[in-house]
Amino acid sequence: MGQWIGGDRDGNPNVSAETLEYALKRQSEVAIRHHLTEVHYLGAELSMSFGLSEVSPEMQALSDASPDASAHRADEPYRRALIGIYARLAATLKHLTGGEAARHAVAPQNAYATAQALLADLRTIDASLRLHHGEALASLRLRTLIRAVEVFGFHLATVDLRQSSDKHEEVVAELLATARLEGNYSALDEAAKQTLLLGLLNDARSLRVVGADYSEHTGKELAIFEAAHSAIQRYGRQAIRHYIISHTETVSDLLEVLVLQKEVGLMQGTLDAKAVNELIVVPLFETIEDLRNAAPIMRAFYSLPGVAAMIQRSGVSKM
């Protein structure tokens, strides 16, 4: 699932890093509260005791790790495990969104670092139920919850970033001029732009000058990239996957976004030394002429030294 709310800046100056952060936080809260509700209901449904049902060793370990110390549930491994999962999810909600869970059998603690860690716990319960004649129980709410976590994680939906190519060019031009590398980037022809941008992508150094006074536009644009970098670390890689470039007309329009990713750590390494990038650059061809040039532009982009290898290492399919 994906959407543009909070990430589409093309023609909308009101979208900022703060807007993006707010959208991601609200999405995360919706997803985690759903998971919390389902875990609560599962705890009521999976109340089997040791006297009626065996459990797998992994399930027993999950139950033993639960902070639930109630003597009333000492012989209920699934319920104890789910109370522990709820406590971890409640701590995750607090950490990612600042929100409070509706119920607390035990205090929130030990937040999940990733949605995959939550999935692992739920799959442990699922496997134990299926192994011990609990197929019917596993196929109801638990399997639905597992699928929800697979799809929505802690992020709910991927936020697509979008900006017009000319806005990226303005930022790159200012960065280059301030660094005294190129005083009039926009006046260069396409071949010269590509050569310069490829050189930057093969240079491990940052373009930004410490203490330099950049324009409001450049500051806002770089802040968006920085917010995207933080969001991926916070909510998971699926929180933001695509960077859509409106009015794509040339190969340099794509390279400029890679340069801006590199500036904030969304691209690690250099094109000639095993680079990986977090955001898929997605060209948007918006005129008849641009559509006619789309295939040659993309062929030229993927044929540039290091680009195809970087995409493969990053686990990203070609557009």
Image (tube, rainbow, N blue to C red):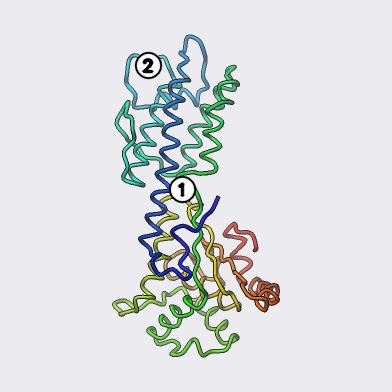
Q: Dot 1, crowdedness within 10 Å: few (<14), some or many (≥20)?
A: many
Can you say whether 292 is above or below 238 in the image? below
Q: Earlier in the sequence, mark 2 or mark 1?
A: 2
Where is residue 81 drawn, in percent x and y?
42, 25
Where is residue 6 drawn, in percent x and y?
43, 59
Lateral position of residue 87 relative to residue 117, left or right: left
Q: Quadrant of residue 224?
A: bottom left
In the picture of the structure, the residue carrying the numbered disc 1 is: 155
In the picture of the structure, the residue carrying the numbered disc 2 is: 73
Residue displayed at 46% across by 31% down:
38
Q: Quadrant of residue 15?
A: bottom left
Q: Dot 2, crowdedness within 10 Å: few (<14), some or many (≥20)?
A: some
Lateral position of residue 10 relative to residue 311, left or right: left
Which amino acid, mark 1?
His
Where is residue 91 drawn, in percent x and y?
34, 38
Label 1 sits on a secondary structure element that is: loop
Can you say whether 235 is above or below 184 in the image? above
Give the CA distance from mark 2 to mark 1.
Answer: 33 Å
